Image: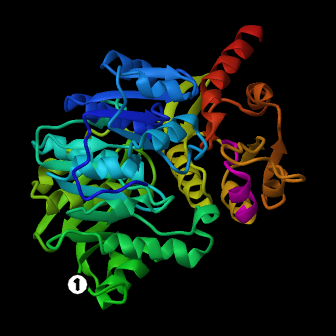
């Protein structure tokens, strides 16, 4: 990263990997603020088409010549250090020309400078809780700028340049880049070891959240989920002063049992009750410091989604929004793409898709699927899982197996390596060894839909799960089910 004491010139910004969820969102905001934007990516996508229509100049493929897409060299080049190799020709060309190269998070931090930032961090739940916060604040009369790692189903976008003084963003811890930010309110949904290929140790991973807490504005607040052991431990350490010299205001949120178990942490929002219905979950939440009680209607299934909604509620209240209006916004929230996203129903079989790629996330989504199946009187839950990264698969094989055992049947796809090279002798069957129920291994991508149709009957729920190409299979499974009916 290149830094300077002089203000960063954002008049012409070139973005390497512009089609990614985080990068495309920042590009949208830059364009809306009147900056010139160029970029490159390895393939076309809907995001790139949308950015082009908004005025961005984008090349497919990486080449040093892409730095001239705007007619003159950019004033800054933006990259994701985790996703883009340092020998990328555009990065090399920028260094040779003396153009500053910044991380995505550095640019996002610059865009937040004149606004009150509500940042939502955590190992899991960042995108959903951030999206709920945006919907809630919009309903409360705010027009926040926002940058999210997924697309809001209603808005169909992952970023927006708002007219208000609030900026809501998902804070990614995967490479420590969220330490670029200085938020007014920081939410930590949970802290559970992940991205050990970057951090090396579980201790180092936990410590980066402690450093994040110290980045708060002097009058800011840390909001932590007390139902998560890692987030609760973070809150306790911050309250005790063990994480730094600065005194940080901390508010806990969670179920009554979890809040009462940590009396040293000031209760910010307490989930007093939850009732699962056909349409979602109805929760009663009190905010003791504001002497308010509201009802939250959460349409995405799962108790973890109620906690995410509670985080969004408390974050909005701390920014000055009315709790009842925030609750109304949460009640209209339709979800985020790839978060328990409903794709359709054929012959009584419902098909959903979810981004879950960590054992805890899989546990949450399969528990939610089970609750939805029970509430609607449906049948079995079949999970199609594509592991993401060889390192994560090897580190958590047993935990993945335990989580997937919550399904009635599991189809294991081959590992999606993403940025990692294959590891000899390692495939997804190392997870299957730890699944207590019925499972099968299907390494042929295109064969999965037919496998699913052979295993399901009316009333079953099918979930495609993972952070890779598995998302492409949900509609293919529906198509295969339709064809199966036609052939019958």
Q: Is residue 199 above or below residue 401?
A: below
Instruction: Judge by depth and name the residue closer to the eye, 371 or 291.
Output: 291
Q: In this view, does 389 lie above or below 9?
A: below
Q: Residues within 10 Å of mark 1 (few under 14, many from 20)?
A: some
Instruction: Judge by depth and name the residue closer to the eye, 254 or 276.
Output: 254
Percent position (x, y) of residue 187? 31, 63
Percent position (x, y) of residue 25? 35, 36
Color theme of the render: rainbow
Q: What element carries label 1?
A: loop
Instruction: Judge by depth and name the residue closer to the eye, 218 or 72.
Output: 72
Magenta span has 389?
yes
Q: What residue lies at 61% left-to-right and 39% top-to-bottom? A: 463
Disc tally is 1
Q: In this view, does 295 lie to the left or right of 227?
A: left
Q: Which quarter of the picture shows residue 434?
A: bottom right
Task: Tell me, yes or no, if residue 376 can be seen here.
Answer: no
Residues in magenta, as a range:
381-396
Q: In this view, does 412 lie to the left or right of 67?
A: right
Q: What residue lies at 51% left-to-right and 58% top-to-bottom? A: 174
Magenta span has 252?
no
Q: Mark 1 points at which residue?
A: 247
Q: What residue lies at 26% left-to-right and 29% top-to-bottom? A: 31
Percent position (x, y) of residue 267? 24, 77
Percent position (x, y) of residue 240? 32, 91
């Amino acid at each position: 990263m290149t830094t300077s004491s002089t203000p960063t010139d954002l008049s012409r910004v070139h973005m390497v990997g512009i089609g990614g969820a985080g990068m495309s969102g920042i590009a949208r905001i830059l364009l809306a603020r009147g900056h010139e934007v160029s970029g490159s990516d390895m393939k076309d996508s809907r995001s790139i088409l949308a950015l082009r229509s908004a005025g961005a100049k984008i090349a497919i493929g990486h080449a040093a010549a892409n730095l001239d897409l705007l007619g003159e060299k950019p004033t800054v080049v933006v990259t994701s250090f985790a996703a883009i190799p340092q020998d990328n020709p555009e990065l090399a060309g920028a260094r040779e020309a003396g153009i500053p190269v910044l991380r995505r998070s550095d640019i996002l931090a610059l865009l937040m400078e004149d606004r009150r930032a509500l940042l939502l961090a955590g190992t899991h739940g960042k995108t959903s809780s951030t999206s709920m916060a945006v919907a809630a604040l919009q309903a409360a009369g705010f027009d926040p700028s926002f940058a999210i790692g997924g697309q809001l189903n209603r808005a169909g976008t992952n970023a927006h340049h708002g007219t208000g003084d609030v900026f809501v963003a998902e804070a990614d811890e995967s490479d420590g880049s969220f330490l670029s930010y200085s938020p007014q309110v920081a939410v930590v949904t949970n802290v559970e070891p992940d991205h050990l290929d970057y951090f090396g140790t579980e201790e180092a991973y936990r410590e980066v959240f402690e450093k994040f807490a110290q980045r708060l504005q002097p009058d800011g607040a840390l909001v932590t989920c007390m139902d998560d052991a890692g987030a609760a431990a973070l809150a306790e350490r911050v309250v005790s002063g063990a994480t730094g010299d600065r005194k940080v205001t901390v508010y806990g949120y969670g179920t009554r049992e979890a809040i009462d178990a940590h009396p040293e942490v000031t209760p910010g929002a307490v989930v007093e009750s939850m009732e699962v219905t056909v349409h979602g979950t109805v929760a009663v939440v009190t905010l003791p410091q504001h002497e308010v009680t509201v009802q939250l209607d959460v349409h995405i299934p799962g108790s973890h989604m109620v906690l995410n909604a509670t985080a969004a509620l408390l974050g909005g209240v701390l920014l000055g929004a009315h709790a009842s209006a925030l609750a109304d916004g949460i009640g209209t929230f339709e979800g985020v793409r790839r978060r328990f996203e409903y794709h359709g129903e054929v012959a009584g079989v419902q098909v959903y898709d979810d981004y879950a790629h960590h054992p805890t996330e899989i546990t949450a989504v399969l528990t939610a699927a089970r609750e939805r199946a029970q509430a609607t009187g449906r049948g079995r839950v079949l999970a199609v899982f594509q592991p993401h990264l060889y390192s994560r698969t090897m580190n958590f094989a047993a935990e993945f197996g335990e989580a997937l055992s919550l399904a009635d049947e599991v189809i294991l796809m081959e590992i999606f390596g993403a940025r990692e090279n294959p590891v000899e002798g390692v495939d997804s069957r190392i997870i299957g060894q730890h699944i207590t129920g019925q499972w099968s291994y299907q390494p042929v991508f295109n064969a999965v839909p037919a496998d699913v149709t052979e295993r399901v009957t009316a009333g079953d729920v099918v979930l495609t799960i993972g952070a890779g190409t598995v998302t492409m299979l949900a509609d293919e499974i529906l198509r295969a089910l339709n064809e199966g009916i036609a052939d019958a």
